[in-house]
Amino acid sequence: MLNCKLFAFTLTFLFCLPIFAQTEDKATVSNQKFTLSGVISDSKNNETLIGVNLYVEETKSSINTNQYGFYSITLPQGSYTVQVSYIGFENVSKKITLDKNTRLNFNLSDSEEMLKEVIVTGTNTSTPIRKPEMSVNRLSISSIKKMPVVLGEVDVIKSLLLLPGVTNAGEGASGFNVRGGGADQNLILLDEATIFNSSHVFGFFSVFNPDAIKDLKLYKGGIPANFGGRASSVLDIYQKDGSSKSFHASGGIGLIASRILLEGPLVKNKGSFLIGGRSSYAHLFLKLSEDQKNNTAYFYDLNTKLSYKLNENNNLYLSGYFGRDVFAISKSFSNTYGNATLNLRWNHLFSDKLFTNLSLIYSDYYYGLDLDFVGFKWDSGIKNYNLKYDFKNYISDKFKLSYGLNAIYYSFNPGTIKPSNLDSGINFDQLDKKYAFEPALYVSAEQEISKRIAVTYGLRYSMFYRLGQSTVNIYENNNPVTFNADQQIYEKATPIGTEFYNKNKVIQSYNYLEPRLALSYQLNEDSSLKGSYNRMVQYLQLISNTSSPTPLDVWTPSDNFIKPQIADQVAVGYFKNFSDNMYSLDIETYYKKIQNRLDYIDGADLIANKAIEQIILNGRMRSYGLEIMFRKNEGKLNGWISYTLSKSQQQTPGRTADEIGINNGNWYNSIYDKTHNLAVTAAYKKSEKWTFGANFVLQTGQPVTYPNGQYSYSGIVVPSYGLRNENRLPAYHHLDVSATLTPTKNKDRDWKGEWVFSIYNLYNRKNAASINFRQNSDTGTNEAVRTSIFGMVPAVSYNFKF
């Protein structure tokens, strides 16, 4: 049974929060301080705006709107000039007299002057000097849509690869690696719901429809205490709410996929709907070829959202996502996989200083195989049910408190094996389903200690319970992996018994404190030094021997054999704006270590394995590096240059003095190690009619293990391999360009369209996805064969809105 004291403490914690906040209000009034609060939105459609800056001229205080467009600031009684700024919108300046708690909403209008420039971020692109926030990047959808991409399809995930500290998981892969961590160590959230696989068509595209996205933020370090469950990063993405003023439609038609988004009012100025669909149709062209007519590869997805404003203090949201990929070769093999999410949210204001959000979230990731040529079907997946309750208490203009809880219940299906036809020799088999419960509490504070020093500090207390109904193997000395000293290899141990745990009985439990700290010291008005530390604990493990998530990956919970990953990261940096914020320079260095990173014994068999613990060992990782980002924020030509110098290594030493460990117990390059990573992106607005863009990426090749010799056995040539990942693929680089044509006649009509012409990999670089070794059938000599996915890829697409 779970500890009942936890639930009692949680309930007490929740009920006391509003009382505490209201007590603060009374104390504030008695000291003649009052609260200015409200919501900032787009005047065209009432879409709330995230990260809008509100600045009080007299006190030099500032605050940004939260993810729901809400702000709150407490000031002494008096008269003030409030300035509201958000790039792409007109600045607003308003005189107010604050002699009572005041609700003041702002509706911002498009700025004609700003629209004549190319915007590269949705918020102020200059570096925030005073805020302790660091290792965080935000990109706007408008900038992402201007980036050239493969096959002309806008890709949210691939735009992140242009940021420092972020690399790709391999050619053609949509997964991404952050600061030397694995793709499975990234927490990806869409409207707070977990996305377990971010790719379509085996990594060629991401699952995010750019037309439906409002805001995205990547945390590489200094991660706030409200996030947990992953060891490397957090990608937080929010969908649009939809227009509550009038009906609108937008979309695009490309060479292999098209999309459409519809939005409009349910009740004017109170409720709205949004529905977006996207689908590829490249598989239709396969039917034209006699050799390919039985093959297929396509994806589709659906984004939905309903929003309703009950009154000034209450808002309801219902959002969802559904996506599927289908890949089939003739009638012998097919693969289907995808995500499904649903989130019901309630925003409530207990007072002008206490904002709350209650969310009920469902997330499902399914993946299945139909191997008709061997006569069986395999289904697997992971589901979770999440309750989140978050509080933001704006105690004063210099002190803000966030606190809350979340509780996640997991259901894992490692595999259901079924015969696919009557002639199949495969019998039905269900691998033991696994269940887990992950509750957590957190508290976090933002505080201005002085005019120069600002700090964010917090603590997260996470717990994890691996639950029955399940049969657990028992091993001698509790060791599922044995070491064969004679052959110097690791082998599967033979269970000496089993134990069955009834439903909801705790098999294994863990709990950890996860401290978070970020500090900013302002050197002057234009520069600052910052530092951060955070601990993250990851209780879910991805069982995979590939460099990025694929449809064959299996998620599994921590248990008595598989330990949680524990990541500790420190970072320091120097940040500067100059030339009136036209240019920005960010320099950061970091060090990260991770305990209990899974490693695999040689010859590990991962698929449909009923005893995963027999093929894995607990190792450790470390990564460190230097990141530099230089941005030009304003003008017709803008963009950035980012460079990362880094190292990512893994080690699995022997458990005793007699064991050799993996790779002789030495540190070796992880598959995510990219020593050099250079990215350049630029956008140039030549006129109202033409806009040009370009990206250049250069990365050190991915670590791999090549054979270092061979031997012959019974006439069969068998390769032998050296140490793990001591070789590398060739350097990865490509140049992409695009041109956007916006007809001038768009100004005089509701229908607005644009043509986007792009070339991915302009100079036709054959980047290696892999290199395989074989014996030439004609000469008998050994040869290396490079596999490349993309050469030069031209594309054209048409985007519209009305």
Image: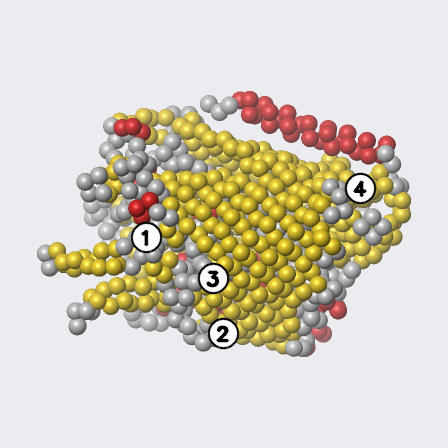
2 or 4: tag closer to the N-terminus = 4
4 or 1: tag closer to the N-terminus = 4
Q: Residue at x 16, y 69 (%)?
A: 780
- Kind of residue indicated by mark 2: Ile
Of badges 2 and 4, nearer the viewer stands 4
Query: Tag 3's secondary structure?
Result: strand
- Kind of residue indicated by mark 3: His
Residue 52 is situated, as x and y percent measured from the top left of the image, at: 72, 53
Q: Calculate the distance from the C-alpha at mark 3 to the C-alpha at mark 4.
A: 46 Å
Residue placed most toward the observer, 461 or 745: 461
Q: Calculate the distance from the C-alpha at mark 2 to the C-alpha at mark 1.
A: 37 Å
Query: Tag 2's secondary structure?
Result: strand
Q: Give residue 181's mark.
A: none
Q: Residue at x 31, y 48 (%)?
A: 663
- Kind of residue indicated by mark 4: Thr
Q: What is the crowding at mark 3: few (fewer than 14 residues within 10 Å), some, or many (at least 20)?
A: some
Q: Calculate the distance from the C-alpha at mark 4 to the C-alpha at mark 1.
A: 58 Å
Q: Which residue is mark 4?
A: 74
- Kind of residue indicated by mark 1: Arg
Left or right: 75 with respect to 472? right
Whether pointer 2 and pointer 3 mark residues with C-beta atoms closer than 8 Å, the reply is no
Q: Which residue is mark 2?
A: 759
Residue placed most toward the observer, 63 or 179: 179
Q: Which residue is mark 1?
A: 724
The picture quadrant where one finds residue 457 is top right
Q: Give residue 676's mark.
A: 3
